Image: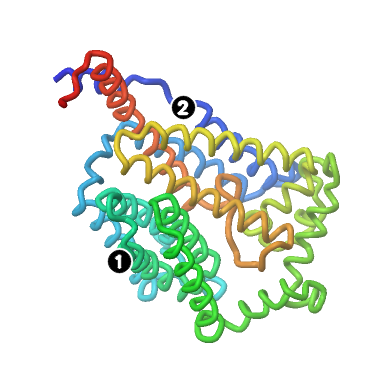
Amino acid sequence: MEHEGLLLKDKDKHVDWLMLGSALLLSVLGLLTMSSFQSSNPYFERQIIWLGLSLGVFFTARTIDWRAIRRSGVAVSIYGFATGLLVLLFILGRALKGAHSWFTVGGVAFEPAELAVLALVVVLAKYFTDRHVEIAHVRHIIVSGIYAFILFILVALQPDLGGSIIIFLVWLGMVLVSGISRKHLLAVFLLGVIASVGLWNFGLHEYQRQRILSFIHPLADIRGSGYNAYQAMIALGSGQVLGKGIGYGTQSKLKFLPEYQTDFMFAAFAEEWGFIGIVIVFALFGVLFWRILFAAARGATNFETLFALGVLFYILAHVMVHAGISLGLMPVTGTTIPFMSYGGSHLLVEFLMLGMISGMSRYSNAAHREQLKQEFSGGYDV
């Protein structure tokens, strides 16, 4: 009863405004990059609506008691639901630019791959929580890998190479923090090499292979497969220190840089805001990562800690891949940058994740206060 009293008091705890504020500011910077301030922009107008809905999702999620998803049945059900949606994509999904990645309901498109990554974080947090004592056994790496591999294949077959890479990186990050041994870590990397060879020979489409070859030889075909990456590097470099000014990015606004609202948002932003803007963006992501790590460190159980770390790896993987593409450090795969790129699916899921972390923090704070009280009162059983 005393513990419940502490929990009730925590329901009124203030929101982590540093975490929410950094995400919100990143979203605003993305909105400013979408708008030219000279004519109506449908991406800008729709994204404002999505941002409003996402904030509603955040504040709703933080009021929910998420301890129910610690149960194996609930975690596996969430994973099964997300997997089922990915399978249904091949039957009922909408094909756009050759990829079956979206459901369309009432003119609104939804991409279930983002929800699938959230489901993967939940099920892996539950799996590693239950087996953290014996995590060094290789079978747990294999079983967790199967969870990730199923989603990896379903997303790769859409085809969505960027989404499948994010799934792999999230799994790898969660495996690393779960306590994997060094020899098993080496085995994971060897399996990754073998999987990459198999993916190249049997899993990739020809245009995807050409993008990778263009990454290796960036100037070999700048009018063809290397065009997007070349234009992104021009946009990023032309921003110099202070940028060209909000709404004055020539590469993006004159359509030399394709899909700048989504796949090349970082390059479009850098062109208008320059090096100073990039520093601001990385600083905001740094604050966001710090607050997520803070929540992870104060998790009531290993589940909350692993869940928060999984969210961290999800956002970090997106930032690394998206920025790496614009900088010419990675081949073009078609990924968004969290909070900044246009799209309702990823924005809703990202704010949902932050809302879940905030909701978990309510009872984790109560648990920590109860632990401190027991320590000072000598209330632990010997």
Report x, y in % for residue 262.
Answer: 62, 56
Report x, y in % for residue 282.
Answer: 66, 41
Q: Is mark 2 on a helix, strand or loop?
A: loop
Q: Which of marks 1 and 2 is in front?
A: 1
Q: Which residue is drawn at 32% across and 42% down?
A: 302
Q: Earlier in the sequence, mark 1 or mark 2?
A: 2
Report x, y in % for residue 86.
Answer: 37, 67
- Quadrant location, the C terminus: top left
Q: How far apart are marks 1 and 2 (CA)?
A: 38 Å
Residue carrying label 2? 16
Q: Which residue lies furthest to the front in this view?
A: 382
Report x, y in % for residue 316.
Answer: 55, 49
Residue 16 seen from this side:
yes
Type of the residue with mark 1: Arg
Residue carrying label 1? 139
Give the quadrant of residue 7. Answer: top left
